[in-house]
Image (cartoon, rainbow, N blue to C red):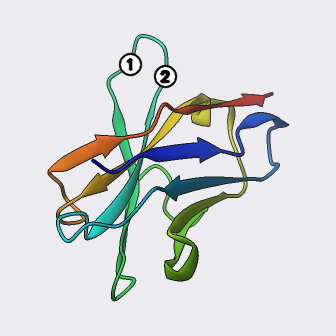
Amino acid sequence: QVQLVESGGGLVQAGGSLKLSCSTSRRTFTGRAMGWFRQAPGEEREFVAAVFWNIGTTRYGDSVKGRFTISRDNAKNTVYLQMNSLKPEDTAVYYCASGTTDRGPWGSWGQGTQVTVSS
């Protein structure tokens, strides 16, 4: 099973930036894509972004388009989420996941990292 570890969360003021990282223990044939999701208290989990390991194709949720950028470093088995122009409504626990495609299914999940945006 793929192990995923997120890092880079923290507290930032509105308008600021953060970069999250998700390191994987190994890449499996079935884990061809990586995704970022977030969940705020009392809310459902929301898709943020996804990227294919091999060709780098990306997909974004509507609420983050133009502000967030997902990227990957194949040599380091690491996926990143650059978050710019952060808003208080971006506050959530952010999770990375390994998936078969950029639309899932998502088989392995990290433990999450907290992002808090103050107004």
Tell whether 80 sits left or right of 105: right
Residue 69 appears at what percent x and percent y? 57, 67
State which quarter of the image contains the C terminus: top right
Q: Is residue 95 above or below residue 85?
A: above
Residue type, mark 1 in image: Glu
Residue 51 appears at what percent x and percent y? 38, 70
Q: Is residue 24 above or below residue 78?
A: above
Indicate the quadrant where residue 14 lies: top right
Residue type, mark 2 in image: Ala
Instruction: Please name the residue shown 62% across and 29% down the image.
Output: 91
Mark 1 Cα-neighbour bin, 10 Å: few <14, some 14–19, many ≥20: few
Instruction: Please name the residue shown 52% across and 33% down the image.
Output: 112
Residue 92 appears at what percent x and percent y? 56, 28
| Residue 101: mark | none
Disc 1, SS: loop
Indicate the quadrant where residue 52 lies: bottom left
Instruction: Please name the residue shown 25% across and 65% down the image.
Output: 102
Residue furthest to the top? 42
- In this figure, which residue is indicated by the disc labeled 1? 43
Asked if the residue at tag 1 contacts the one at tag 2, i.e. Cβ–Cβ closer than 8 Å, the answer is yes
1 or 58, which lies in front? 1
Instruction: Please name the residue shown 20% across and 71% down the image.
Output: 29
- In this figure, which residue is indicated by the disc labeled 2? 40
Disc 2, SS: loop
